[in-house]
Amino acid sequence: MEVPDTSESWKTKINTVAIGATQDEGGTRAGVVRVGGAGCIPGAAYEGDAGERPVVAVEVWDVAPDNWPAELTRHYGDALNDPGAWAQKGIEMGADLVCLKLTGTHPDAADRSAEEAATTVKAVLKAVDVPLIVWGCGVPEKDNKVLPACASAASGENCLLGSITEKNYRTLVAACLADGHKLISESPLDINIAKQVNILAQDSGFDLKDIVIFPTTGALGYGLEYVYSIMERGRIAGLSGDQLLQQPVISDVGAEAWRAKEARASDDDVPGLGPAERRGPLWEGITATNLLQAGGDIFIMRHPEAMKMFKEAVDEFMGVGSV
Amino acid sequence: MALSGLAIYKHLPKENCKECGLPTCLAFAMKVASGQAGLDDCPKLGDEARGALAEASAPPQRLVTIGEGDGAVSIGQETVLFRHDERFQNACGIAVRVEDSLEEGELAARLDAIKGLSFDRMGQVQAVDMVAVENSSGDSGRFAAAAKKAAALGKAVVLISADPEALKSAGSEIADKRPLLYYSGSADNVETAAKTAVELKLPLGIESPSLETISDMTEKAAKAGLQDIVMSPGREKPSEVLEFLTKTRRAALKKKFRPLGYPTLAFADGTDDAAIVAASWFVLKYAGIVVIDTIEPAAVVAILTSRFNIYTDPQKPVQVEAKLYEINEPGNEAPLLVTTNFALSYYSVESEVEASRVPTHILAVDTEGTSVLTAWAADKFNPETISEALVKTGAAEKVSHHKCVIPGMVAVISGSLEEESGWQVEVGPKEAVGIVSYLTSRWKR
């Protein structure tokens, strides 16, 4: 029996954003990571160009975390005290790039200075040859001091820096323009704000094609459905021709998944759910692979087993079927 | 083509008897038109009107019920491809596969394990709700015996066999439990399987990775008098299964293509991580039943939670009752934390309080299910609403210190809340993750 054709074709593609610069391009990276480029809805490689492979960025901090559960820290050991060594471990685990979070610059944490942060950025760039994402602590006044110093320390390396918000974007936009970096625009689960932040960056002279959207992230069982739907809506709007939503998307999976009780609780606290060494990676891994189906491009992750699970899933996700 | 609400309304009794559960016949007609109700819900519809309407107004995807009583699982009758367009209607069934070739002891142990796959999460029970018995032995006596044991769990049963005779004998054994007869054999024999299903009045599952073939099969089964059909691509790669699930749903909803207007079933064979990922994907993208092999609790919880997330109604925030909760048996000197009645906010606080082991009162203020910041911005979480909740719940009688702790995100209201309520207000951590250290080190009576 003849079956009606239900294939969907779209007007436009999601932008392809390149992160990192090789020697020829004025940087020191061994290679460049390209994300985005999809011309079909997530998982629909059978009817369109699935674009670039979604990638994993290992989450690295500038200071050793004091509240990570043992199930995470045991995989990094002493490297947690040395961002360069930590980044190396992450790459050995299979990550495609590094996401350096400057948690230690937060005024309520170690309140590290802009100079210290810039030194850390340089140390990580030296320790690994993959592209780098640098993320501020989220306090506007502090980020506006720290991130320009980091941008300048990594000048020419074509990093991805974040994040700008509706209320704080000018300083970081200027720094990224000056030092040749890409930008993360953040909007809390709101499509209109996502567009607004992109407009603000564009009005400040930033190219929409150099932006990655961070719609914030929710873990499996802890609001995943909100971000799933926001990402789905954004991706469909982008494919339908909305230039303000044609950006690839970054998901902060590790940080969210490891806040979940199912991931971080001790075995005694969640009897019947099995050992932490399975619960944690599964919670992080399934959060990531579920968001893959909603249209994520860069996934910041923590646990080696979760990364492995995710990367294998990406192979299947990119596969072209033949019904 | 589907009819408009008004076209349907013309044929209805127009008595507004409310027996369909809706206030008026017009409201019912609108529901039928949007595919969210079936004509069977109207008890007063005459045969003639029914005949005229049935074909034209059937939902684009049929609702199929498997199992019986409390264990019944209804799947299908979905109306959208993306949950943000409305919502996903009928949560898919999660079935654990059991092979009838297992030794008696192993079979009993596996069924027992399945029974235990029920978890209390955020005040709701999330459980495996189906058992899929596969006729791996090739022996129909063994198949029927295993079916009977599986049915005793009280969960909906799927019987899987390529042999129509085996399906018949096992199906008759537990026909009163309304199992799904899943015929995994070739298209050539689909009429035989369909006749069995019609005879036993049971739903039938059929499989083929080809959309053309499966359409031919459903048409043949429909000609044999069968309406309750479930379609599957069979044991294919996850990416191909997803393609099948997506295309059949699109054909049914967007093209109103009747031969594919049935719910679906997908297999996530194996117990490795890839199978867990695949099962979760099938839940998100359109399966009516997902058959899994894993009984690892953490994996099953992840799959069940994916289902919980995707079937949440985007228009209705998940709420908890607005009241004063007691965690870890608090006395009148225990701290009192204030949050909203948005389930995610409340349970984030509750799970941290539980982890801290500090006896604590939690006041969930009625913010119509919105989160702390959203409710604050919408003026639903303010000194007035919080004071009102403190009074309404009799909090003053439960704690002697007259101090309450508000989320750090709304520190700005602490002064006016003190004035409004007469309580002493302390500013707690901004995020739930800081609660443990707050309660164990910073909270002072």
Image (spheres, coloured by chain):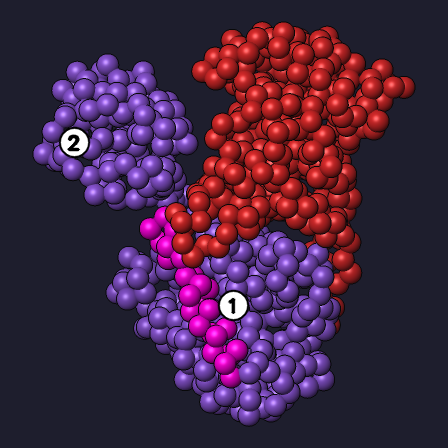
Q: Residue at 32% x, 73% y: name it.
A: B44
* Vertical comparison of B367 with A289: above or below: above
Residue A300 makes an appearance in the image: no
Is residue B117 found inside the magenta-colored segment of the image?
yes
Name the residue tied to disc 2. Answer: B333
* Vertical comparison of B259 with A160: above or below: below
Q: Position of residue A310 (x, y in %)?
A: 66, 46
The picture's colour for chain B is: purple
Give the amino acid type for the residue marked by disc 1 in the picture.
Ala
Name the residue tied to disc 1. Answer: B95
Residue B142 makes an appearance in the image: yes
Q: Residue at 18% x, 20% y: name it.
A: B424
Chain of the residue that carries numbered disc 1 in the rendered image: B
**Does residue B351 appear left or right of residue A229 in this picture?**
left
SS of the residue under disc 2: loop
SS of the residue under disc 1: strand
Find the magenta span and give its range: B104-129
* Vertical comparison of A156 with A55: above or below: above
Q: Position of residue A173 (x, y in %)?
A: 65, 12
Q: Which quadrant is the N terminus of chain B positioned in?
A: bottom right
Q: Position of residue B118 (x, y in %)?
A: 41, 61
Give the amino acid type for the residue marked by disc 2 in the picture.
Glu
Earlier sequence position, callout 2 versus callout 1: 1
Identify by letter the chain in red: A
Q: Residue at 58% x, 67% y: name it.
A: B293
Q: Residue at 27% x, 36% y: name it.
A: B358
Q: Quadrant of residue A42?
A: top right
C-alpha span from label 2 to label 1: 48 Å
For the view shown, which residue lies furthest in the front direction?
Answer: A78
Q: Are marks 2 and 1 on the same chain?
A: yes
**Does residue B19 appear left or right of residue A277 in this picture?**
left
